[in-house]
Image (cartoon, grey):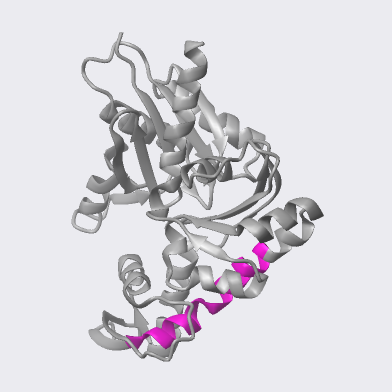
Amino acid sequence: MPVTDIGIDLGTATIIVYVKGKGIMYQEPSLVAYDRDANKIMAFGSEAQQILGRTAGNIMAIHPLKQGVISDFLVLESMLRYFIRKSMSFRNFLKPRICICVPSGVRDIERRAVEEAAYRAGARDAEIVKEPIVAAIGAGLDIMRPNGNMVVNIGGGLTDIAVLSLGGIVMSQTLKVAGESFNEAIREFIRQRHNLIIGEQTAEEIKILIGSVSSDPELTQLEVKGRDSNTGIPRTIHMTRAQVLEAVRPQVRQIVEAVRGVIEKTPPDLAADVAGRGIVLTGGGAMLAGMEDAIAKYTGIPTVLVDNPQQTVAQGTGLYIQQMSAFEKR
C-alpha cells in the first residue's frame, strides 16, 4: 500500500519538510498563531506569519522551539501533525516513516519528547537523528569511512559544530549563537546608534541584503525604516555594510572561536583529516556573506559553503530515511 517517507528539519526559525520522491515540499517559519481569547491555534507556518500583526491583539506568536529547546510540547506536536498531514497524499493508507533532526547537544529528555511528538502526530516509525549527521549526509560527505569530516551548521537559533567519523560524532559543540543572534545584534546596534526601533523581519532583510563579515571597504547602503525610540514617529536612516559588520562581529567571533576549539579537542589523526579535507559550512545562518572566509582565516583550514545551505539538513533527512527504507526491504 502507498506510504510516505518524510524528513523534517525542525529548526528554531524554519521548518523544512522533505518527502520521498518529491524533494523539499515545504519551507516555512517554525511559527504558530494562537488566539488567547478562544484558547485555540489559528494557523501554522507561513499562514501564521501572514496574519500576525494584521489582526486583533489577542492573536499571539508561539515558537515551539527556542534555541533548539522545546518551549511548548503541545504546540510542537500540533505543528508536526499539521505538516505531516499536509505532506501526505490522500491515497496513503499507512502512517508515514519520519526522520527528524535535533541538535547534537540535545538532552535525552528533549530527544524523547520530539520522538513522542512525532508518534502522536501520526508517525509509524520515527527516527530522531543528530543534526550534524544529516547535515553531512545532505552535503554529500561519506561519514561511514574512518576519516575525519567537520561540519558547521549555523541555523536560526543554534550553531552545531561537529567532527564525524565512522558514522558517528567524535567531537561536537552546540552554540546558542546563530542567524537570529545576528538579527538581534543588528536591531540592538540600530537602537543604540540611531535611536530607531526596527522589527525582526527588517533586521533579517538588512542581514540578507548588506550583511557581511568581510572587511571589504565597499560602503553599500540600505534605507532602513523604523520607529524613533524617543518620539515614536516613523523615520528612515541609511545603514552601511561596515555598520552591519560592526554589529555582528562579536557573534561571528564566538562562532569561529568555537570552531577552533572543537578542532583543538579533536584527536590528532582526525584533526589532520579535517585540515586536509576542509570544513563544510551549512545552514541558513551560514549565508552571511564572508562567513566561510572568516572561519578559514581563524582556523587556517579551507572552508566551503555548500550549495543551497538552508536546505542541506532537510535533504540529509530525506537521504537518511531512504536508507531506512532500503534496510527495511532487506
Q: In this view, does 60 lie to the left or right of 327?
A: left
From this view, report whether residue 204 is shown above or below residue 307: below
Provide residue 324's location: percent of width, then percent of height. 50, 22
From this view, report whether residue 214 is shown above or below residue 180: below
Tell me the chief SS of the magenta region: helix
From this view, report whether residue 181 is shown above or below residue 32: below
Provide residue 216's location: percent of width, then percent of height. 44, 87
Residue at 48 percent of width and 47 percent of height: 139
Residue 295 lies in the magenta-colored region: no
| Count of marks overlaid on the render | 0
Residue at 47 percent of width and 69 percent of height: 182
From this view, report whether residue 112 is shown above or below residue 268: above
Q: Taking the image as drawn, is residue 133 in sight?
A: yes
Provide residue 228's location: percent of width, then percent of height. 31, 84
Q: In which quarter of the image is residue 42?
A: top left
Q: Where does the N terminus fall, quadrant-wise?
A: top left
Q: Taking the image as drawn, is residue 70 in sight?
A: no
Q: Is residue 272 left or right of residue 34?
A: right
Residue at 44 percent of width and 26 percent of height: 322
Residue 248 lies in the magenta-colored region: yes
Q: In which quarter of the image is residue 229?
A: bottom left
Provide residue 84's location: percent of width, then percent of height. 34, 28
Q: Give the range drawn in magenta.
A: 239-259
* Between 63 and 215, the one nearer to me in the picture: 215
Q: In this view, does 41 lie to the left or right of 249?
A: left
Q: Which residue lies furthest to the right in this view?
A: 268
